[in-house]
């Protein structure tokens, strides 16, 4: 196994391979036109001149991760099919999370939309005392490690507190996010560490958007779960119990499943069955905005691993959760 340790933030990385200056913004950063150390890890310029990490496995599968927000935006298996969804009108301008560019057409109750891939919700899921879904998706993450595991590239990103986060949440923390790409799978590991001298609590989720044909999509593995259903009123969830073997998306869907199974199965209606396996993500969320995103709601569903209840961390304590997506 080959390992490269990196302790820098890539937008300011200095490498001799190729240096490119973005004269529009006045920001200089390195754009690497070949793999780093032959590891299947490449850094390049993405949409909006934002740096992204590209992982390519020996089997030809590929993933893209933007450092702004630490957001996985693409997961392609070896046949080139992308199993994740990003809205065609997503804005990549670093002034906001990678998301919808026009909120004026959305009901005011939805204060925030992201636009696909696997965005972070941290240290808050949903609305609350700070901006919706927290600040992790609004900040630059840094690459601290890259490795190759028998042909499967992996990268570890890091996020730490700063003036922006402390203005909303006055705690010192470290978030590590490891992404591993395989021939037919992509795995993530999120570790949150309390680096402060006082305890804090948080909740979190991975707001995963899957490419889908919504009328043919179903999710299995949720039967028997306690539900908090936000249809029809997202501000007043109704408690219930899931009785269906296969949950479908006939219209607007926004439902939390508490104490969900550690493996769900998504039929995306496009010929793929995706296993969504997790460790320590105790809950799940299904979401599709239906007519509130009329231009594209037919093309995706969200199946999210989440920790809805608060995680309490004492100083120096850590919490880790893993997600493994595989296709058959």
Image (cartoon, helix red, strand yellow):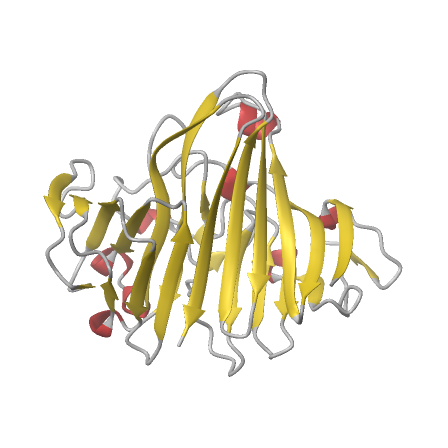
Q: Tell me the residue at 45%/34% (across/down).
A: 123
Query: Does 163 sit left or right of 26 as displayed?
Result: left
Can residue 89 be seen here? The reply is: no
Task: Identify the residue at the far top of this view.
Answer: 198
Q: Is residue 117 left or right of residue 14?
A: left
- Residue 283 versus residue 30 in the image, above or below: above
User: In this image, 89 relative to 302: left or right?
Assistant: right
Q: Quadrant of residue 295?
A: bottom left
The x, y position of residue 273, in whole percent, is 34, 74
* Quadrant that contains the N terminus: bottom right
At horizontal 49% and vertical 47% (from top left) the residue drawn is 97
Q: Nearer the viewer, residue 150 or 118?
A: 150
- Frontmost residue, 129 versus 281: 281
Image coordinates of residue 205 in percent, x first then y, are: 40, 45
Give whichever of 312, 208 is nearer the camera.
Answer: 312
Whether residue 33 sits left or right of residue 183 in the image: it is: right
Quadrant assignment for the C terminus: bottom left
Residue 56 seen in this snapshot: yes
Q: How many marks?
A: 0
Q: Residue furthest bottom?
A: 79
Query: Where on the picture, by quarter, is residue 252?
Result: bottom left
């Amino acid at each position: 196994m080959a390992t490269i340790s990196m302790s820098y933030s890539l937008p300011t990385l200095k490498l001799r391979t190729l240096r490119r200056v973005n004269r529009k913004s006045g920001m200089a950063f390195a754009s690497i036109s070949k793999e780093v150390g032959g590891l299947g890890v490449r850094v390049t310029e993405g949409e909006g001149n934002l740096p992204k990490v590209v992982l390519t496995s020996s089997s030809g599968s590929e993933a893209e991760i933007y450092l702004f927000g630490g957001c996985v935006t693409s997961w392609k298996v070896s046949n080139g099919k992308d199993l994740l969804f990003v809205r065609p009108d997503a804005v990549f301008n670093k002034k906001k999370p990678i998301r919808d560019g026009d909120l004026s057409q959305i009901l005011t109750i939805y204060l925030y939309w992201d636009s696909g891939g696997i965005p972070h919700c941290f240290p808050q899921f949903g609305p609350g005392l700070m901006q919706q879904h927290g600040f992790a998706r609004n900040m630059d993450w840094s690459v601290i490690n890259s490795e190759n595991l028998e042909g499967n590239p992996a990268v570890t990103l890091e996020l730490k507190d700063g003036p922006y986060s402390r203005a909303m949440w006055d705690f010192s923390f470290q978030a590590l996010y490891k992404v591993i790409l395989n021939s037919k799978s992509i795995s993530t590991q999120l570790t949150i560490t309390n680096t402060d001298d006082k305890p804090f609590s948080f909740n979190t989720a991975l707001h995963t958007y899957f490419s889908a044909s919504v009328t043919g999509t179903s999710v299995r593995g949720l039967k028997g779960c306690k539900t908090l259903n936000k249809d029809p009123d997202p501000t007043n969830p109704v408690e219930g119990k899931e009785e269906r073997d296969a949950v479908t998306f006939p219209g607007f869907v926004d439902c939390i499943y508490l104490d969900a199974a550690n493996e769900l199965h998504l039929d995306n209606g496009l010929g793929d069955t995706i296993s969504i396996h997790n460790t320590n993500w105790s809950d799940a969320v299904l979401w599709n905005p239906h007519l509130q995103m009329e231009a594209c709601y037919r093309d995706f569903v969200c199946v999210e691993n989440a920790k809805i209840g608060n995680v309490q961390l004492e100083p120096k304590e850590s919490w880790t959760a893993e997600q493994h997506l595989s296709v058959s």
